[in-house]
Structure formats: structure tokens, C-alpha cells
Image (cartoon, helix red, strand yellow):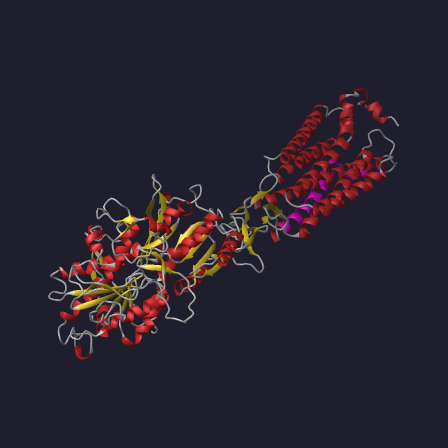
Amino acid sequence: MPAWCWSAYKNECIYQGEEGTQNFFLDGDVILGGLFPLHYSPVSAMWTFQSKPAPTDYKYFSARALRWIRAMTFTVMEINQRQDLLPNISLGYHIRDSCDDIPVSVKGSLLLVNGQPEAEQGAGCIDVQKKPSPVIVGDAASGVSMAVLRTLGSFNVPLVSYFASCSCLSNKKEFPTFMRTMPSDEFQIKALVKLVTYFQWTWVGVIGVESDYARFAIQQFLLEAARCNVCPAYVHFYPVTLSGETLRELMNIILASKATVVLNFSGESELHTILKECKQRNITHLQWIASEAWATSKALWNDFSDLLKGTLGFAIRKGEIPNLGSYLRGLNMSNVQTSNFLTEFWEETFNCHVNGSLNNHMHKQEAKYWGPCSSTESLDNLYSPYSDVTQLRVTYNVYKAVYLIAHALHNIITCVPGQGPFQNGTCGSLSPLLPWQLLRYMKQTNFTTLGEDVRFDENGDPIASYDLMNWQVEKDGTLQLVRVGFYDASLKEDRNLIINVSEIFWHRENKAPVSVCSKNCLPGSRKARRKGEPICCFDCIPCADGEISNQTDSIDCLKCSDEMWPNQARDQCIPKALEYLSFEEPLGIVLGAVSIFGACLTLGVLYLFYIYKNTPIIRANNMELSFLLLFFLCACFLIGLTFIGKPTNWLCQMRYTAFGISFALCIACILAKTLVVLMAFRATIPGSNVMKWFGPVQQMLSVLLCSCVQAFICIIWLTSKPPSAAYNTEFTSATVIVECKVGSEIGFWCVLGYIGLLASMCFLIAFFARKLPDNFNEAKFITFSMVIFFAVWITFIPVYVSTHGKYMVAVHIFAILASAFSLFLCIFAPKCYVVLLRPEKNSKKHLMKK
């Protein structure tokens, strides 16, 4: 049995072994150093310095870290067996426990690079001098790696980390000898921000352990999140060792916020304490987002499966290392006893004692009831994080780190003089092997392993690639880490994150949680920030009249064009409704029907007068002018129809011209009839010859002359500034009024004024002749009709000016119909009454009666 002994630290074994023995030191031509956090969570102790301080004790043993260690020994063994890589050169290793503690890591790194044994006087063992390690694989934590780098910086010893992800380590001015197979947090942060943005989680709680890793990661997350309008509901750092007071402070912060999504930057040991407190307080509503440090940590599942189901997190790329599983499970009692680390793992896995063990199991009080190991224990039928090879992520990084060093060494021995990377093309040397030369070759090394091309950028960082992992529950209650997406930094910005939402299992009710300070402002509203609060806290204000927003969470509303108007939801502009008096609406139908009724009634009276044209009452009241007046009144009634329908330029010109001329003709006929009455009585005076100068021909000419004046006014109007159709948005915002603009206001009022002048003359003459003593005298009826005519049009003017749109047109039609009916009824209704109902009065005798 090979000789071995324990050093001053109970967790360290210094062994001079042979190749292939199950130990953490193996001699070789080149010794690779290794730092792994096999123990973690130190037990706090107060040192009085009245005696030599005792070694620090640690609460937990990491079977996962033991797998990383064994992966390194496996990789070295695999490389040594290859003939195409490092022929005739053997690799060795010297691996130490960093305890995830800076003092232990710094001390261990110094022991690795100087090759000196750590022996204590009186320990009863002899330590053998070891070769210095020109390169160290480690450490896992970013903060520990930074401390080691600052210590070894003056010696130019390369440090290749397999798990340190802090972006600060990419600073080559501060850490020039650092390389890693773990992607920088810079890419992880971008992936995390894209993740929360994808699910519209704008109100996120951010917590992290007080370490360089968490500080730099959270700082970068906040900067990146601000660009994507994601706000931190709170940012809180907690110490590595959580006391009751610090735990209460953290829980109070979480409970006081309405953020349901919490992003945590820490390792599994710190999170374990937080989850334990959450379980005691029954805080089960949180959707956890894992940093890569614990995104695949199955050790948390057994105690907190009810809290962690549905957890999302980015994990580094997984690899499958052939034969590693059988190598890890190949432990048995005989080789376990060669290392205190393996002994401790064996005892805690099978709850038994190995003879001669120095493991005090202080974190397991029940250990005193354990019996001795039977040598029949086997890892084949037992689950352990140590032997679990289904999620080889950090383990794969360890594998790549060792291969990186091996390929760099291979490049040294195969270097052709004159083509080397140093001055004058010189090559590096293996005897002696200078760490700074090895670092130069490592930075230029690209290789392929397990089908993956491993490349590094100018900072010594690998190209980032992450798997989006979802914590799901198997039927038997065990954890299943399901890959539901990926992030690849080598792809374009808009396509480097792919998520398969249908495969995600969510924490509560299996649906994505909502974590926002304010709910999204739907289209039709805009965001208005709350004073003094983060940008994610806002109120939703409906868009003003004439404005829309067609996107969720719009900052501003967009104004519609003059021809457009928002729909009811105010999320799109639609063409404004055209408003005009149409034949399809009730008002248009009524006015059109009245117009047609008036025209038909006028034609009916015209037909009646034609039938009774030879009767005294028809002949006595200037039959020709009566027929002409009825015809023009029929035209006035029909003119109302031209005001209904969608206006066009042609229709607008026609309606105003026809209106002016038809009413001028009507009033001219009435004026002529009035003059005839007056002249008829003047003709009864002896010696008067008036009727000779105002016979039927002269009457027709007078009507024509009066109408020509109106026609002349209309011609000037039409040739100078004619009426035209126009789209008016001045009065109502939601509709476009299609109306007829009169063009020349002077022309419009001249037409109305001339009609008024004719009506005034007619009224004055009829007023003077109203009491002439004959039964066939029409003057009193004409006077009354003119009174109604003036009343209608005097009322029309202010109403016309004060209304707009289709109602203004309706007022115009009403004035036309009212005035036309007043003329028709006042002048022709009495005659129709006599003709139809009192025929005895339709005689010459009755008409000549004084």
C-alpha cells in the first residue's frame, strides 16, 4: 500500500503516488495545479490569539466539486494515454481544496507554484518535495480567483478558471494572466435581460451575495436592463454568512415589493439559507431566475422543490465526456482510503465510518450513530451529485481547461524555430517551462474537443453559449432540468435568444407570472411617468381627441391627419365619416318627400286650373300669369331636391343658380299679378288707357325682365367665384362635412337681396291694392303671402348663419319649402276652394258684385 500522511489541515493530503492511483497528486513532467472548493460555508470563530489559531472548519462538503476534481484527474489520465497529443511527455497534477475561501485559496496557490510541501513539525509524516506548477486550473469563485491572481500576478503564472464568470476578470490590465473556459458574465447578463424582456417582466427583484461576482454582475445587469426599460424593484446584497437579522431584512424587502420575479446572484450555499427562511415564512409566490452559479444545482431540490419548481436560468454549455461516468463510479473501499477527501465523500454518501477516518462530520449530528462501512457499498445503484453525469457543464469546463493547457504544451514542443511567437521567431522551452511563455501559447490556442471548436477572444474568454434551463418535476418528485431555449452570442442580436415557451413549466398554475410595477398601457393610451418613481411605474392616460396609439406602452400619442379620425378604441386612424344631407337618412327622406308633395300638389292645381280655365274666377285673375306662377312654384319645390345628396361642384353651382332664378321668376309673376290688379282698377277711371300699355305681352316681358336681372347676377357670380363642394373639418372633429361653399359671399347675398327687393315691391303694391272693392281682387292674399315669405326668410338668415353641416342645408330647404307653400296656399287655396267647394261663387255675377 502506498505511503500517505495527513498535513496540518485535516482536509489536505500530501501524497507522493504513482500514475493511476486515486489521489490528488500525480507526478509527471509537467504538474498542473488545481484549486477546487471541496468544502464551503466556514464556521465563524473568534480568535483570541492567545494560542495558535485552529484551522477553520467548514459546514458542508461538495460532492459536485469532487466530481470536478475527478474530472481533472480523468482528463490528465486520458491525455497521457494519447499518442497524438504530448507524445513522450506526461502530465501530472497537484490539486488542493480552496474551501471557497480567499485565505485558503491564496495559501494553496502559493504552495502549488513553489512546489513546497506543507509539513508541520511533529506531525509524524515526511513530505516529499514536489515540482512547481506553471499553471493553475481554478478557482470556481470570481472573488477567490481575483485574490489568487493579485497574489500570483508578479510571478506571471496563468490561472485558467472553469467557473469564474465575473466580467471584471476580462480586464487584461488588472488580470493579464487570466484565462477561462467559462463565458464572461457580460454575455450572461445580456441573456438574462433578454429573458425578462421576452416575458415582459419589467419589475424584477435583484439580490446577490456580497462578493465581487455578484457586485459586478448586478451592476452590469442594472445598466443593461435600463436600456430595455426593465426596472429593479429592489437591489439587495446579503453577507456570505446570513444572520437572523440580515435574513429578516431580506425577507421584509421581498415581501414589501409586488415583484414576483427574483433574480439571484450567488452560489447554492448562500441560497440554501434564504430558501430555508422562505419556506418557514411560506413565501411561495416567487418566480426564481437563477444565475449560472446555481442554474443546474440539484442539491437544492430535495429541500426546496416546492419553491424552486419552474425556476429559469442560463447554464453553460453541456458536454458529454465518454467513460467519465464509469470512472467516477469506479470508487471502492480500497481506493477511497487513499484520500481523506474520498473518505469524507464515502462516509457522507453511505452514512458509515471508514476505519482511520479523520472526518468529524460536524455538520451532521447524527453521524455518531453511523456504523463501520462494509466494503460492499457501490455507487452504481445510488444517486449522488458526484456521479451524476447528465448535466456536465462545469465539469466540461474543467475538461476543456486541461485540454487547453495540453494543446498549448503540444504547440511548444512542435514549434518550428524561426516561426515561434517570441522575438526573432523563437519558440518556448519546456526545460525550463516558463509560465509567461506557456500563457502566450495558451492565448493563441484553438482546438476541437468532443466535436466543439474551442476558441478564445482577445481577453481570453470563450465564445458565450448558454442553455436556458427550466426546473421541472418528474412523476416521482425528482428534479428534471429541461432545456427550453438557448442563447448564442455568436448569432445576430435579434436572433441570439430562442425560447420554446410551450415546454416551460411555470411555478404557479403553470402560467407565466406577471411582474410589473404598472400594467401595460393598451393601444389607445399613453404612458405618463409617476413623479419620483422609476420609469417602469406609470399611469395610463387615454389619447386626446384626434390622437391614437397603436402600440402597447406608447410614450406619445400620434395625431391623425385632417382626413382621418381615431376609431372608438383610439388605436388606429380611420377615414372620417362624410356628413351631408342624404336621401337615406330620415331628415333627407322627409324633406325630399315634402318637396315632391309640393311639386305634385302644384301640378295638380295647374291641371285643375286648366280644366276650369274658362270659369270666371280663373279668367278673372290673369290666367296666363297664374299658369306661369304655378309652373315656377313647382320648380321651387323641386329645387329642394338639389340640396339633398353629396355635393359636387356641378351640383353646388346648379342648386344656387336654380334657387335664385326660380324664386325670382315666382316673385316676378306675383309682382306682375299685383300690378295687373292695380292697373285694372286704374283702368276703370274715365279717360284712362293704362291696360293698353300693360297687356298680356307686357306682363310676360316684365316677368322676363325681372328674371334676366337675377340671371345676370348669377352669371357674374358663376364666372367670378362660383360655388364649389368643400370638405370642412372645422366644426366637428370626427366627421368631414361635405358642403357647398358659396364662393363669392357678395354673389350669394346679391341673389337673396334681389329676391327680397322683388318681394318688397310686391308687398308694397299689394298692400296698397288690398282694399280695392272687387271680389276678384288678389291683393290681400298676395299681401298675406308676402308677410309669410318675409317671416320665413328673415328667420332663415340667423339660423342659416348659426348652423353648419347637413342641418344648415336642412334649414335652407325648409326655408325654400315654407316660402313656396306660403305663396302657393295664400294665392291658390282660395281659388281652389271656390272651384271645388263653392261653385255657386264661380260666376261672373258674383265676381262683379260690389
User: Is residue 366 visible from the viewing direction of this image?
Assistant: yes
- Magenta span: chief secondary structure: helix
User: Is residue 385 visible from the viewing direction of this image?
Assistant: no
Q: Position of residue 119 (x, y in %)?
A: 26, 70
Q: Quadrant of the C terminus?
A: top right
Q: Position of residue 370 (x, y in %)?
A: 31, 49
Instruction: Please count the marks in the image.
Output: 0
Which residue lies at the image location 21% right of the left edge and 58% below the top edge? 338
In the depicted view, which residue is nearer to us: 641 or 444? 444
The answer to if 696 sits in the magenta stretch is yes
In the depicted view, which residue is nearer to us: 72 or 607? 72
In the image, is 15 to the left or to the right of 766? left
The answer to if 302 sits in the magenta stretch is no
The answer to which quarter of the image holds residue 642 is top right
Q: Position of residue 236 (x, y in %)?
A: 48, 60
Q: Position of residue 748 (x, y in %)?
A: 68, 49
Outermost residue toward the bottom in this view = 424
In the image, is 760 to the left or to the right of 112? right
Which residue lies at the image location 73% right of the left edge and 34% below the top edge? 821
Q: Point out the stretch of residues depicted in magenta.
A: 688-717
In the depicted view, which residue is nearer to us: 620 or 662? 662
In the depicted view, which residue is nearer to us: 70 or 641? 70
From this view, report whether residue 127 is shown above or below residue 713: below
From this view, report whether residue 516 is shown above or below residue 669: below
From this view, report whether residue 456 is shown above or below residue 254: below
Q: Quadrant of the N terminus?
A: bottom left
